[in-house]
Amino acid sequence: MRPALPLDRVDAGIAARDVRESGESIMSQPPRVAPRSPNEALKPVAPPAPPPKLRKRRRSPFIALLSGLFTTALVLAGALGGGIAYLDSRSKAPGPLATDRVLIIPKENGVTEIADLLQREGLIEHPWAFKVAAYTSGKAASLKAGEYLFKARASQKDILDVIAEGKAVEHSITIPEGLTSEQIMARLQQNDMLSGDVIQVPREGQILPDTYKFQRGSTRQAIVDRMTREQRRILNEVWAKRPADLPIKTPAELVILASIVEKETGRADERPRVAGVFINRLNRKMKLQSDPTIVYGLVGGKGTLGRGITRPEITQPTPYNTYVIDGLPPGPIANPGRAALEAVVNHSRTKDLYFVADGSGGHAFAETLEQHNRNVARWRQVESARRDSGRPAVDGGVDRAEPPPGPDQRSEAPAGPRPDNQAATAPDGAEPETFPVPGNRRAASGPAGTRARAFDASEGTTRDPLLNKTFDLNSPKQVPQLKP
């Protein structure tokens, strides 16, 4: 038999077994202390060993530098973004300009000069803000000189966009149909918004009359180049649509006949029929007998006589006088518009050989000389009634052929106004009573009992009230009166 163990050892053994079986650490549970006798002294228990200290890893100086730089960059980016957002909001705010304003930005001005100019003229408040916006938006190098219109309360962003995109003010110049090249060059020269000289004046008929837009400072030569390019483009389009039986063989001949039609009538609805008369005459080998060709043969590019055509001038030989020559003249007598070119190609299919003024601004057409003479007689009755009532004549006789002398008037001196577009040659060669004259002459009304001054909208002289003004010569509106 084994001897019995003291109670305190038994308790200690049980405790150790429990710890081993549970796998728990002695540190996790306090040790059990057996009850001791009052006479036994308290023995100290050794504390558990401290856990091993972790070894600190040294930080790389390079990484620390990068971290600092990154943090600084974030701070600066935030500040910059906030500043840009603030400036952007301010640049979109309404500006100080009270009313619409046109301002000219001179050439070779940089961002600083432009910003200072805008500030002086009251368009912006802070030049530095404009410069910052120009550079941050990438538009600083795109600012263009020119004449600009800025709306009232325009924001700094709107002003910057207008200048950077070159949205300059556009002006216009209108070239009426029927002017000669010399007259057109005079109009360009008198327009003080254009610059430079015309290096080479285009030949007659090479300019397309129209309204052309341009910016202040554009060169006159650039406008002329545009006019000639447009004329070639339109001429090619119209020529491609010509009928096979047209007795016009080249585009140049088309321009020549169109210029005659242009000078003969200012009414758009009559152009095809007037063109038909000349086509019929060409087909029948008749002389065209157009008064505007007499005038061009006498004065050339000047374009107008400023008086009536005398009887000796009707038969005066010139290369352009279609009373003398057969067929078409050697070149155009003016610059026709697109409508006149199309009128020749799409001429009326009639048998008309004559036309004369009807007293209402239009013309009466006839197929025979007999019909034509009746139309002339009616026109004379209208003119006689006008004279008897004290009203002005339909035409004052400027650039018009004079009527043949009556039985009691055999002088060669000018005898006054005569009907429009009276053809002189009959199909059978008989001598007609009257002569053709241009149909685009309009009379400006004058005081009762006085002779009216004639107005020719295609003259382009110093008497022309339409000089450098926009006016549709083909509209039915009354032509402005001349100043006395």
Image: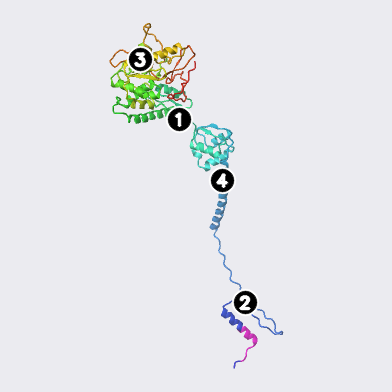
**Label 4 vs label 3, nearer the camera:** 3
Q: Is residue 201 visible?
A: no
Mark with earlier residue (1, 4): 4
Q: Residue 333 falls in which quadrant of the image? A: top left
| Amino acid type, label 2 | Gln
Mark with earlier residue (1, 2): 2
Real-space CA distance between mark 2 and mark 3, rounded to the nearest whole angstrom: 144 Å
Circle 4 is placed at which residue position?
85
Residue 15 drawn at (x, y percent): 61, 82
Residue 5 drawn at (x, y percent): 63, 89
Circle 1 is placed at which residue position?
213
Q: Which residues are magenta?
A: 3-13
Real-space CA distance between mark 4 and mark 2, rounded to the nearest whole angstrom: 64 Å
Q: Which mark is residue 374?
A: 3
Mark with earlier residue (1, 3): 1
**Label 2 vs label 3, nearer the camera:** 3
